[in-house]
Image (spheres, rainbow, N blue to C red):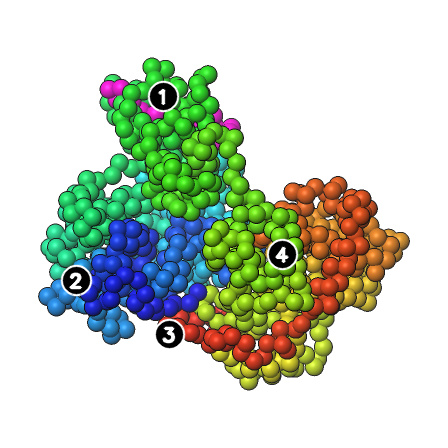
Amino acid sequence: MTATLGTGQEAGTPALDRAKLVVVGNGMSGARALEEILTRGGADLFDITVFGDEPYGNYNRILLSEVLAKAAGAAVDNEDADGWDPDELYLNPVDWYAENGITLHAGVRIVRIDRHAKVVMGDDGSVTPYDTLVLATGSRSFFPPMDGMWASRTELTPGVFGFRSLDDANGMLDHVADARTAVVIGGGLLGLEAAAGLQAHGLAVHVVHPTEVLMNQQLEADASRVLRSKLEDMGMHMHLGVKTSEILVTDGAVSGVRFTDGSDLACDMVVVTAGIRPNIGLAMVSGLETQRAIVVDDRMRSVDDDDIFVVGECAQHRGEVYGVVGPLWEQAAVLADVVTGADPDAAYHGSRLTTKLKVAGVDVAQMGVKGPERESDEFVQFSETGRGVYQTVIIRDGTLIGATLVGDVSKVAALTQAFDSRSALPEERVKLLFDLGSADDAASAADLPDDTQICNCNGVSKGDLVGCVHGGAETVSACMDATRAGKGCGSCKGLVREVVEAALGGAGAEDPADSYYVPGIPLDKPTLMHEIRTRELKSLSAVFATLAPEGREDVGSKMGLTALLRMMWPHDHVDERDGRFINDRVHANIQRDGTFSVVPRMSGGVTSPDQLRRIADVADKHDIPMVKLTGGQRIDLLGVPKEKLQEVWADLDMPSGWAYGKSFRTVKTCVGTDFCRFGLGDSTRLGIDLEERYKGVEGPAKMKLAVSGCPRNCAESMVKDVGIVAVEGGQWQIYVGGAAGATIRKGDILATVDSHDEAVRITGRFLQYYREQANWLERTYDFVPRMGLDHLIAVVVDDVEGIAAELDERMQEAVDAYVDPWAADQQEATPGQFHDALPMVPLPQVPVRSSEGAPA
């Protein structure tokens, strides 16, 4: 990520005519408040400035557990990473702020408010005036006092982590590779999510919780027991009713924890999820009333200052502080109504809490009270521990006052509606939990009242979704884009689909956008390719002008279209650089600190002393902070600034390894017959020939290959997009559709061939068919099952459709069109290609490890 300072001069009326709105806090609450303000015409009313501690745009903290659990690289386009799209994490990337006329100071902490002068002061020395100030400072991890927790007054002991920010998640990702055992202190939601994420990396995970009830803020004892059983079945170790007294430290790093009974548990890392505390230090030093958080009135204003508004976890309203998103969205809407004047009398009256979560893969929903509180309360309870299902409802005076669902949350929408509206309940209370000959789910979705909240994360009601449909949205995805429903934790996507489909005319309503190759052009891939070919459209501009609705360009479609055009017109497509992702523009992989990694080609993983010396010289000359072997048998030069890329390429004088972009990347090999006593085929030679032939060929997604010299499979060929294994009799088995990243799949045998040349030919034909038929970003592990192995064998091997020769011919065209980008693109082809067009803020650099494993 790169922190960018936007100009704030692009939207609305001239800045001099607008009041100054400053938002302190760029988390989910602050950004949501901004969105609500913009929706009410805020860009015309205010000159808006945002300060955020973190050097990023606004991201979805709910997805941090996925960042940790994905187990496939960091939130960057890493060569070894599979299946993670960092765009999914960011609600508003830095470009969004500039596009909306907002000046963003990412990585700047506001340290004081001068309420008399009406200015905020940053830790960078800046002084920024405001007319209206919004505090959305959120909360931080709570670290209970404990020996061994801290290495200094400000730094945790190495191996101890909180779990609150993207940096926390990335810090753990950096650490897990060298860890085997983790202790998570705290068995609440965050703790269990952290535990699941660490377990996904293969660590033995111990959860330590001071009470016998997991998630005791949400669940009662019986529900907790079912959840515990489910988690223990997954391999987690639970220590309930146990307190940690000390973190054990050896040689300056975590080595274990000690419990209050004196027993020890050895571990390599500790994650502390013992609760959160609102960030109220800024308010305190600035003279605002604080108790548990910053005290606000019903209009979300500080009780001390009418020009200062507060929203989110740092706000205390009528004694309550909320830590889930639903109330925060309600607060943001009221704040925006008041600030913009859209409804000056808008008031927040508190929220009834309903929570729907996926905890370590287990669905959990809870609302209201956790159990009966009076003898007269009706209590319906169902438990099926073998299936990990537990459900209760509590009814008082004919009204639903509480419900808990674990493992099966299919009834959560109806229960939430009954809870929120206090509506009449069925005489047979069990119908609240089970369908007893009642209408099916689709009918239930259609029957829900409009104010039923469908997406808790983004506060989207059924009425919002139906309104989208009535406003012209014709697809589920269009409604999701317009409302953000389903874009939080994602657990409501099924219900969102049901509601939208019902509004569109029934459960059978189709979503045509699902078949579009790219979202901006309403055509499936075969039709799109036919139109492009027939009309000879060879540039992005031409495709948009001819085929997009009203000729509108769509940013989200550009990468997919660019790859398609380069595949279809390998020799004469018109290269428009804005159609490329940053990695493709500079032929290097952007890293999370804004630097790049450079990977020269080593075909088949083979190199020479001369190449090694050159790489070492370049690393020395340019002070490359890290030189690392990749999973694809190459050498990665990490930490290269963008403006140094041309120099590094020139000094290397080696071809590009294409370790970026959606293209053919690498062929991993074993030594085969060269040195191995078991080698049946020359895997090294075949790997080199494959990589030399198909290098840089673009596709709908990246393509990784491997060749193994025998079925011992040292090159991991069976889990690659295409893997080739030598077998007895001089034959080669060709596997397709394998994966070993976030998705694990053993490849299917496409063919067994008799020669090296036949293996090269069939591989190329399969890849060309994949390039022409796969959806954008569809990896082979999804493509092969979708197309069907029998179909692929019939087309690619047996040529039953008679297109094999054409596939071979088109792949040959792509091979002939190869140009090494480092050799061809040494001069700056477009303005700003190798330097930053906007003023940049230096980002915290990735800590570089020494060869001994410790940060250098």
In the image: residue 776, left or right of residue 124: right
What residue is shown at x 13% (from left), y 60% (from top)? 287
Identity of the residue furthest to the right in this view:
729
The image's mark for residue 535 is 4
Using the image as rendered, state which of residue 155 and residue 76 is in the foreground: 76
**Residue pointed to by mark 3:** 839
**Residue pointed to by mark 1:** 380
To which quarter of the image does residue 619 belong? bottom right
What residue is shown at x 58% (from left), y 52% (from top)? 776
In the image: residue 215, left or right of residue 694: left
Assign a secondary structure to mark 2: loop
Q: Distance between the residues labelled 2 and 4?
A: 55 Å
Instruction: Mark 4 or mark 1: name the one nearer the start of the chain.
Output: 1
- Residue type beneath disc 4: Arg
Does the residue at mark 3 contact the one at mark 4 (Cβ under 8 Å)? no
Residue 605: image location, x then y, percent:
70, 68
Residue 669: image location, x then y, percent:
73, 62
The image's mark for residue 240 is none
Q: How far apart are marks 2 and 1 (CA)?
A: 54 Å
What residue is shown at x 39% (from left), y 49% (from top)? 62
- Residue type beneath disc 3: Pro
Q: Please state the extent of the stretch shown in magenta in the rendering.
A: 382-398
Quadrant holding the N terminus: bottom left
Task: Decide if residue 196 is in sight here.
Answer: yes
Instruction: Mark 2 or mark 4: name the one nearer the start of the chain.
Output: 2
Q: How far apart are marks 3 and 4 (CA)?
A: 41 Å
Using the image as rendered, state which of residue 502 and residue 258 is in the foreground: 502
Identity of the residue furthest to the top in this view:
427
Does the residue at mark 2 contact the one at mark 1 (Cβ under 8 Å)? no
